[in-house]
Image: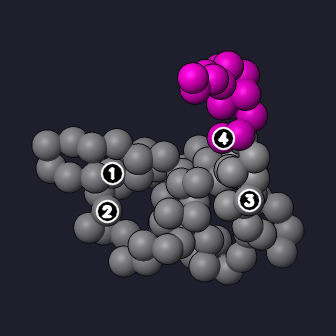
């Protein structure tokens, strides 16, 4: 008989995995976020083609994405603005 994990256990495991993906903010992240700084949603076609950087920014909550009929769009989050405004 299999035991079911509680919702709390599942959430804790997920949070632990997210912490492992957290990386230090670097110049590549800063350059990507500068494209999003003064705008709302921006189409992915207007942004640099850097899938690993984009994935890292999404995982850390520094950007968010949405799907529209025209494609994927991104915008910077408050957490992203905070990281961008920190001194180098």
Q: CA distance from mark 4 to mark 2?
A: 27 Å
| Residue at the spot of label 1 | 73
Q: Quadrant of the N terminus?
A: top right
Q: Position of residue 83 (x, y in %)?
A: 74, 58
Element type at mark 2: helix
Q: Which one is in front in this view, the residue at disc 3 or the one at disc 2?
A: 3
Q: Residue at x 29, y 57 (%)?
A: 43
| Residue at the spot of label 3 | 20
Q: CA distance from mark 3 to mark 4?
A: 10 Å
Q: Are marks 3 and 2 in contact (CB under 8 Å)?
A: no
Q: CA distance from mark 3 to mark 2?
A: 26 Å
Element type at mark 4: helix
Q: Which one is in front in this view, the residue at disc 4 or the one at disc 1?
A: 4
56 vs 77: above or below: below
First-in-chain label (3 vs 2): 3
Closer-to-camera residue (61/18): 18
54 vs 52: above or below: above
**Does the segment drawn in magenta span residue 8?**
yes
Q: Please give the label number shown on residue 56.
A: none
Q: Please give the label number shown on residue 44.
A: 2
First-in-chain label (4 vs 1): 4
1 vs 72: above or below: above
Relative to 54, 66 lies left or right: left
Q: Bin the neighbour count of mark 2 within 10 Å (Cα to Cα): few under 14, some 14-19, many 20 and up.
A: some
Q: Residue at x 72, y 22 (%)?
A: 8
| Residue at the spot of label 4 | 14
Q: CA distance from mark 1 to mark 3?
A: 26 Å
Span colored in magenta: 1-14
Q: Bin the neighbour count of mark 3 within 10 Å (Cα to Cα): few under 14, some 14-19, many 20 and up.
A: few
Q: Are marks 1 and 2 in contact (CB under 8 Å)?
A: yes
Element type at mark 1: strand
Q: Residue at x 15, y 50 (%)?
A: 70
């Amino acid at each position: 008989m299999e035991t079911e994990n509680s919702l709390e256990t599942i959430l804790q495991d997920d949070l632990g995995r997210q912490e492992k993906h957290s990386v230090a903010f670097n110049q590549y992240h800063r350059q990507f976020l500068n494209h999003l700084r003064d705008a709302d949603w921006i189409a992915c076609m207007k942004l640099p083609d850097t899938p690993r950087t984009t994935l890292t920014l999404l995982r850390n909550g520094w950007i968010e994405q949405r799907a529209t009929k025209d494609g994927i769009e991104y915008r910077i989050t408050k957490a992203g603005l905070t990281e961008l405004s920190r001194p180098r």
